Image: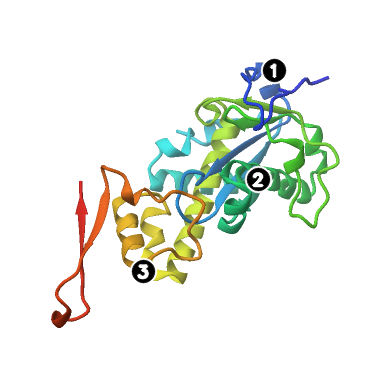
Amino acid sequence: MLKPEKNSGLSPERPAACPPYLLRGWHLGLDEAGRGCLAGPVSAAAVLIPPGFDFSVFPGLTDSKKLSPARREALALAILSSGLLWGLGLSWPPEIDKANILNATFRAMSRAVLALAAAGKREVFSLPLLVDGPFAIPAGQWRLSRKNPPAPLPPPQFPVIHGDALIPAISAASVLAKTRRDRLMAALGRRWPPYEFARHKGYATREHLEKIALYGLSPQHRRSFRIPAAREEKQLEFSFPPADSGPQFRLQVKH
């Protein structure tokens, strides 16, 4: 009988290493993207891996953060074309602001697994779930929404620190979570053009901070986050011209 790591996000104990034998049978990889962004959802992807799956069909597969956008998209297409079952979970800014980013990330992760189960593989709840990072998903976060009951029995979880670079199943989930989120941010950029979300994906880039200084926060910004515009290394200040020179103003960025 599998003995999963007992710790949860609410008790950050030292997680156990993933037993190598788990990778030889059916297992799931799980990872998130967008946790540290100022805007947009946090996304998570879960991927179901059959026994003996040959990951050499995904050359260069690793942590999505280490891949170029073009390489990520190519790998995502290969994963989606391989026949592997996968699920996507999201948590949007209102929920992030209400529940905090850690709990919202857990909810997105659980939704990804539940979406995978809904695709016709409900036995996934008996399979080992390899989660990127030091935390397992707390039992109370296993629900699609407030209207849905929790999952019957959460799967046995095995947190793996740097799992997105060490475990191919988690790497595949990392690529899907990142590319799906990037596409969502491009769509949000078309909905709110001034912020150009497609360019910076909601991260705290200089360009994004300048947009926030100019236009304020959009409905897609996380109001519970401390916008880093006032940090010493990126201090934004406005310079207004005299009243008789018109309503235009100049934005200065000080470093």
The type of residue carrying mark 2 is: Gly
Q: Which mark is residue 194?
A: 3
Q: Between marks 3 and 2, how big is the CA–CA gap?
A: 39 Å
Which residue is depicted at the point 36% across and 61% down? 212
From the top left corner, tell me how far across and down residue 134 is, in percent: 59, 27
The type of residue carrying mark 3 is: Pro
Confirm or deny contact between disc 1 and disc 3 (CB under 8 A).
no
Q: Between marks 1 and 2, how big is the CA–CA gap?
A: 23 Å
Assign a secondary structure to mark 1. Answer: helix
Mark yes or no: residue 82 visible: no
The type of residue carrying mark 1 is: Tyr
Q: Residue furthest right?
A: 152
For marks 1 and 3 on the same chain, the one whose residue lies earlier in the sequence: 1
From the top left corner, tell me how far across and down residue 80 is, in percent: 59, 48
Assign a secondary structure to mark 2. Answer: loop
User: Quick check: 82 left or right of 138?
Assistant: left
For marks 3 and 2 on the same chain, the one whose residue lies earlier in the sequence: 2
Q: Quadrant of residue 135?
A: top right
Assign a secondary structure to mark 3. Answer: helix
Q: Which mark is residue 83?
A: 2
From the top left corner, tell me how far across and down residue 193 is, in percent: 39, 70
